[in-house]
Amino acid sequence: MGIVKQHKPLKKHVWSLVVLNFLDGLLTYIGLSLGAITEANPILASFSPLAILMTKLLLSLCLFSFLYTPFVRLQSRSWLYSLIFVNMLYSFILLLHLLWLILFFIG
């Protein structure tokens, strides 16, 4: 008798993405406003810091809306791994933002 391992629903990974996306927008706004960083995304580079923050806030709200759809109850391995990858990428980007801001304030 083997144990069938079920995949976890996606809710916590979507929540993480909502929070990480919002923090990315907030730290980008702070960094750009202080002149500590430049926007590396060529699409967002032409936007003002406030427009980037509002875009990220809107995207976070859209992602938040996924929490109230059947999507978060999916048991898909491919969606799970995709969300984990994107969350790891966002975490790395946030660490870079924090590093740049720390170096800006101590330097």
Image (cartoon, rainbow, N blue to C red):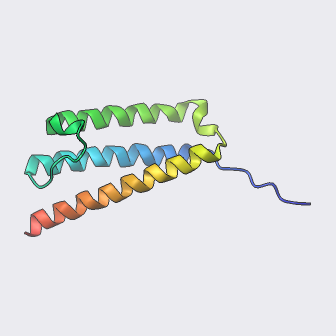
Residue at (24% x, 36% y) in the render: 43
State the image coordinates of residue 30 (x, y, percent, origin top left): 16, 49
Query: Quadrant of residue 89 in the image?
Result: bottom left
Residue at the bottom extreme of this rendering: 106
Quadrant in the picture for the C terminus: bottom left
Left or right, 80 with reference to 98: right
Identify the residue at image location x=10%, y=46%: 33
Which sits in the foreground, 76 or 59? Answer: 76
Q: Establish if 24 lies above or below 55.
A: below
Q: Position of residue 97 (x, y in %)?
A: 24, 57
* Above or below for 6 versus 106: above
Percent across and percent down for residue 65 are 47, 31
Q: Is residue 79 above or below residue 99?
A: above
- The N terminus, quarter of image: bottom right
Count of picture labels? 0
Q: Residue at x 43, y 46 (%)?
A: 17
**Among all residues in the image, which is located at the extreme front?**
42
Task: Name the residue at 27% across, 44% down.
Answer: 25
Q: In x, y percent, where is residue 51?
A: 19, 33
- On the picture, is 45 further left or further right than 58? left
Is 14 located above or below residue 58 in the figure? below
Is 32 situated left or right of 52 in this image?
A: left
